[in-house]
Amino acid sequence: MSQIDSLTSLRFFAAFAIVYAHGGSPAYYFYPFPLIDLRHAVSFFFVLSGFILAYAYEGIDWKKDWSRFALARVARLYPVHLTILAAYVLIFHVYPTRSFTGDGYYLLADVLLIQAWIPIPGLWTSYNGTAWSISAEMAFYIAFPALLWAARRRPLALLIGAALWVTCATLLANRFQIGLTGEPNAWDLVYAWPVVRVAEFAAGIASYRMTARVTPMMPNSKWGATSAELLAIALMLLVMYACTRVTDPGVSILSPSAEVWVRTAGSAPATCVLLVVFFFQRGHVTQLLCWRPLVWLGGASYALYLIHQPILKFQFRYFADWTKANQQTAYLLYLVAAIGIASILFAFVEIPSRRWIRSLTPSRWAGSWLTKKLYRSARRT
């Protein structure tokens, strides 16, 4: 099944938003972006992940192809994650001093990508903090077969169920007086916990299943499709702006848990609309996004997302005086280094590792015609 180039390119812009947000935070360069809370980009990734997986595995037979799916998911997440985590431990000398308690337990959770599964304060941001979201992705992959089954039958019901799930989660958090501070708090439970964030992933799956129903309503002309794409972008930006404004301190009337979700993920419905419109790739905007350098950067976006925070910490730990004295130059170096190292990781770690892992064959099927056929298909997907 062919790659949707326009959606691949969008991943770069979402990853770059997070790169800018972390670099511009008060802990580092302090270049704030007050109009929009850029953590909406993480929500975008969750919705996009569900959408793309539903597209890639639309006709999967779980009895035959479950190993293909599992190997593809391992190949997608682990090589770059483990490479960066190993470098992080070595460069920052954060070796665990205790085996299965304290920091040793934290490292084990990061290696296994389960740090976001357990709502313990500090666990989900341990070591390379951005990896919490791919830990959430691992949980989503486990839920994917059931969610895809539901979407195949009732995609609209799954969309409604995802909205109700978030509503119930925020109401329960409010009932147990989970606030913005304390242990655990709304950030631990509503922002990072996959049990809540799976709603965005489910919405992405359901949105893809809705594309067939939307097809007759999509404009066929180039300029009509371009207008639809521009409107989808405008809707996305407007919703992100509105979600940021209504949750500003002194303005918000929401409960703490609802405030966290709206501020960081309230744009999920608009993301669903954007992905459905861009999926058809009929307008000038999506044609522009199919430009090969942008598609390459979109492919490297996963590595970019994981590597940028270690680069920030490296700058401010080992070159703090120079970085503070030459802030603009240092910030530019940070951006260039993040994109450059991410591209290297994509080309020399992610792509070769994914090919090798996907070529592995379960021993009990070794040499079988079926296995060879399945894995040739997996490499093409």
Image (spheres, rainbow, N blue to C red):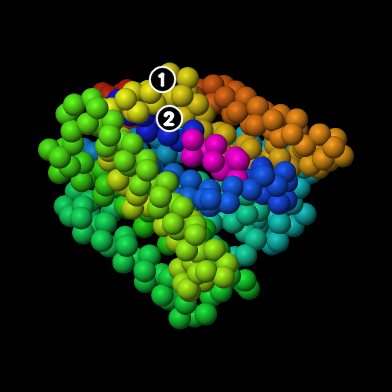
> What residue sits 62% from the left and 24% below the top?
340
**Magenta segment, principal secondary structure?**
helix
- The local secondary structure at tag 2 comes to helix
Q: Position of residue 292 (x, y in %)?
A: 43, 18
**Which numbered disc, 1 or 2, marks the residue that appears first in the sequence?**
2
Q: Dot 1: within a 10 Å radius of its alpha carbon, few (fewer than 14), some, or many (20 or more) residues?
A: few
> What residue sits 37% from the left and 33% below the top?
7
Q: Which mark is residue 291?
A: 1
Mark 2 — residue? Answer: 9
Q: Position of residue 233 (x, y in %)?
A: 37, 40
**Disc 1 to disc 2, C-alpha distance:** 8 Å
Q: Nearer the viewer, residue 232 or 353?
A: 232
Name the quarter where the N terminus is drawn.
top left
> What residue sits 17% from the left and 42% below the top?
214
Is 187 part of what is drawn in magenta?
Answer: no
Seen from this angle, which residue lies furthest right? Answer: 321
Residue type indicated by callout 1: Trp
Q: Position of residue 167 (x, y in %)?
A: 36, 69
Q: Dot 2: within a 10 Å radius of its alpha carbon, few (fewer than 14), some, or many (20 or more) residues?
A: many
For the magenta stretch, what is the residue range? Answer: 13-21
Are the residues flagged by discs 1 and 2 in contact, CB closer than 8 Å?
Answer: yes
Q: Nearer the viewer, residue 267 or 246?
A: 246
> What residue sits 59% from the left and 47% below the top?
33
Residue type indicated by callout 2: Ser
- Vertical order, 56 against 93 (above or below): above
